[in-house]
Structures are given as structure tokens and as C-alpha cells.
Image (cartoon, coloured by chain):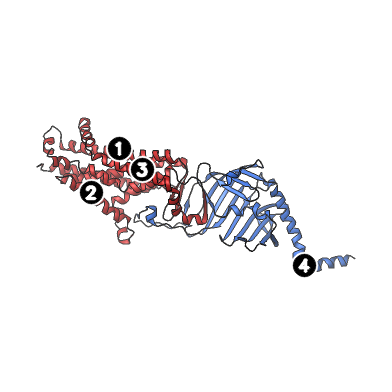
Amino acid sequence: MKTIQILFVIICTHSFPQFCFSQSEAALIKGVKNKLDKVNNYQADGVMTIDVSFIKVPPSAVKVYYKKPDKFNVKKDGGISILPKGSASVNLNSIISGENYTIVPAGNTVLENSTVRIIKLLPNDENSDVVVTSLYIDEKKLLIRKSVITTKESGTYEIEMAYGKYSEWGLPDKVIFIFNTKDYKLPKGVTFEYESGEKKPKTANSENKKGKVEIAYSSYIINKGVPDSYFK
Amino acid sequence: MWKLLKIELFKIFRRPRTYIAFAAIAAIITLIQLAFYSDGEAFLQFGMQSLKETFDINGKIVNGYLVCYVILQTLLIHVPLLIALIAGDAVAGEANMGTLRLLLTKPVSRSQFMWTKFMATVIYTLLLLVFMAALALFLSVSIFGTSDLIILKSETIVILDRHDILWRYFGAFGFAAIAMTTVASLAFLLSVFAENSIGPIVATMSIVILFTILTTMDIPFFNAIKPFLFTNHMLNWKGFFEEPVNYREVLKSATILIGHIVFFVFTAIAIFKKKDILS
């Protein structure tokens, strides 16, 4: 009897590997989703640091707003906030909020000394801008440590997250958002700029086409309501 | 000295032409503010087209600080021409009216006479800048409010926190005072050579226009001589709007401009002291 059971497991895993694994991967995604679902909305305070070769901006205090299912905004009180295009649509809650994707397991890896499972989400909708999303999930804590999102229009986004006191809600203490940047150049006539005759040294990252935005959160106000006007 | 200075200031501010510069500055600033009030967002959309392909920008982009920056960029090129109107007239105007010889019969040394004239010109220049600052900065802030300042450059974008801007404007206006005094001292020097104020005024304007064109043109041959043009250093008020401020470059330009002022004024005094006054 025991031999038959073992044979059944072997035949099953070799003949229908997707079926056998997708159950557990789907359960993991569901677990993460259930955790994130506890958050209907939040308002968070944080400090945003932008590292883009052609933008010089000091770190600034920002307020981050989220509302289910996919409303997300970053505002600087009384100032100007600048965010990579599309970053609002690639926040984690909106990525796994629906179920219109195929789950593909992609093994395990180690991130910052802890083993994480890699799960790829392939959208079923052919018109979706997202081509594939790779999630690096801490199975024990049901937390997404990192995600890599490849889109048709804007290239690849990479989001890295560090968790602390809000991990029970699935909300990170720090998010690092890495994205592709395009060239920026304006005619000197438009900017009223004049040549000084001195050669400007090329900075180390002037050829770097990757940009980085980091938000370090200091506090969250969770499920206390966020007006729709905050997302305009 | 103070009495002489008061007389010089009285002469400057009694002339209608003195107020041409104030009226011109008020008109230009008001027009720029009006343009930004009615269509500022559309103007900026054009400049930020390539930026908006990659980024979403939230906040009050058109604000008093930005409008003031645009005004300074536009006006600080042209204000020297208005300053030349008065500075070029300082000595040549007296010669033209035939009062120079009469003035020098008074118990005042030629050096004292020239210093007083120059100080009156500097006071006029500073008043013009204060007037400009009041309209460009304070009026713009009261109309458009404050927010972070976004500066679009040809290859970079600088965003400055709104609490970190006002001191930069004070620095920029201080630097502009040195730059404008350089032009005033050039016109003052040329004024010594002429018997009619039109000559030094037009000559100063021509030098400033020529040097500014050379500064503007991005041609390798001209790039070699640009560091030696004072008009090139006059633009370094923008150094205060870098992040971080390149104090070395700003101080270098300020020192070069002060060097020009000293050279122009002392040359003017030296020449005037030896000049045979015939008018």
C-alpha cells in the first residue's frame, strides 16, 4: 500500500508538476494577499530620497496615501513631489489584488540572509501593461521582500522592501524603487543657460540609466479613512 | 563728502531719464507675472515634456519663487543697459552741459569729485536692484504663493526646498549688485573720455551686448575667451541656485567682477586727474 502511495506521488509530480506546485504557491500568494487585505487604506509619513543622475533634489518629508484597490499617491506638504511614472500602478496591493494571473514557481533564493521563494505572476489579460511580475516572498512571515515588474511601456521596475514594526500589516518601513530613466536634455535657448567656456566633468553616474527612489516610512495611520481628494 | 553726494543724488533723481529704468523694469516684471498668471502652466509643460515622460510631478510648480527666477534670468541680461543710461552720463553729462569746469573751480579735489559721482551711480544701481527685488520676489510671492523651486537646466533639473530658497535670492541679489556695479563702473570710465553722454552710454551698451552674444554662442573658438569676459561672470548669480552651492565658483566670479570695478574706477580717476578740462 505504501509503495502505491509513493508511486502515486512520483507519477503526480512528474506528470503534472504545475498542478502539484501551484497549489502551495497559490496558497502562499493567498496568505500574502490576506495579510495585505487587512489594510483598506493608510496615510503614512516618510522621507523620500531621489537618486537620478540628472535630478538634484534634497531628501524631503512626504505623505503617502493608499486606498483600496489601487489608489496611491505621494505628496510633499506645500512642495513638489516627483515620482517615477507608473509607480502608483505597481504598488504591491494592486499587483496581487486581482486573481487574473497565472502563478509560476521559480525556486528559492537568499535575500539578506533569509531564504525567500520566488513566484512569477503572468497576467492572463493580453492587454495588460505588466508582462511578468517576480515576487520574492518570505514564506514564514508572509512578506514580499522584493518584486521585479517588467512592463511593456516603461521597462523594468524593481521594488525592495524592508520591514519593521508594521510587518503584521504587510507594510514596509523602507521601500527602494529602482526604475529605468530616459535621457533629459533641453535646448539652452529654452533654459536661458549660457556656456561658461569650462568643460563640465562627467559625473560617475551620468551614463547610468537607472534611477532610484527610496521612501523611509516613520509612521502609518491604518484604516482610518483617506478622502478621494488626496489622490487627485 | 555727504553734502556732495546729496547734490549728486539730487541731480540724478531730478532727471526724468532716471525713471525710465524703473518704469521699464516695472513694465517687464508685470508683463511676465501676467503671462505666468494666465498661461504659466502651459509654458512649463513645454519645458517639462521630456521629464514628464518618466516622472509624475505633483505640487504647485508655478509659484512666486519660480516666477522670480524667470524674471531674473530675463532681466539681469538687460538691466546693465538701463544702468548705462545714468552711469555713462556721470561725467560726460557735466561736460555736455558745460558745468564741468565750473564744478572743478570749487574747493573739491578731482578724486573727491569722481568718488562722489561714482558713489551716486552705485546708489542708483542698488536702488534699481532693490526695486527689482521688491517687484520680482515679494510681489511674485504675494501673487503666486510659495512652493519648492524647480529649475530646468539643459542637462539637469534642480529642485530646491521652499524653506531653503529665500537666502539664495538674497545671495543672488547681492551678487547682481556687484555685477551691475561692474557695468556702472565701465560706463563711468567711458564717461571720462566723452564730451557728450550719448557716446559712453552707447559704447557701454555695445560692449555689454557684444560680450553677452559671445557668452551666449556655444562655439569652441569663443569658449576659449569666455572666462575672460566679465559678462560671463555676471551670470554666476545662478550659482546660488545649485545644490550644493558652488561657493568657490561664485566667489571666483565675484572677485573677478570686483577686480574689474577697482580697475575701471581707479583708471577713470587717474585719467580724470590728468585730464585737461576744456568744457
Host chain of mark 4: A
Residue type highlighted by circle 3: Thr
Which residue does the numbered mark 1 point to in the structure image?
B127
Where does label 3 land, which residue? B30
Q: Residue at x 73, y 58 (%)?
A: A26
Q: Which chain is red?
A: B
Mark before the other along the chain sequence, 2 or 1: 1
Q: Amino acid under label 2?
A: Thr
User: What is the distance, in whole Å, between disc 3 and disc 1 at their CAs?
Assistant: 18 Å
Q: Quadrant of residue B215?
A: bottom left
Q: Which of labels 3 and 4 is toward the front?
A: 3
**Chain ID of residue with mark 2:** B
Q: Are marks 3 and 4 on the same chain?
A: no
Which mark, residue A16? 4
Query: Quick one: label 4, few (<14), some, or many (20+) residues within 10 Å?
Result: few
Name the secondary structure under disc 1. Answer: helix
Mark 2 on the same chain as mark 1: yes
Left or right: B85, with B248 as reference point: left
The answer for how far apart the CA atoms under marks 3 and 4 are is: 76 Å
B1 or A96, nearer to the observer: A96
What residue is drawn where x is 73% and y is 59%?
A25
Pointers 4 and 2 within a single chain? no
First in sequence, mark 3 or 1: give its number: 3
Mark 2 or 3, nearer chain start: 3
Q: Taking the image as drawn, is residue B263 in sight? A: no
Q: CA distance from mark 2 to mark 3?
A: 27 Å
Label 1 resides on the chain identified as B
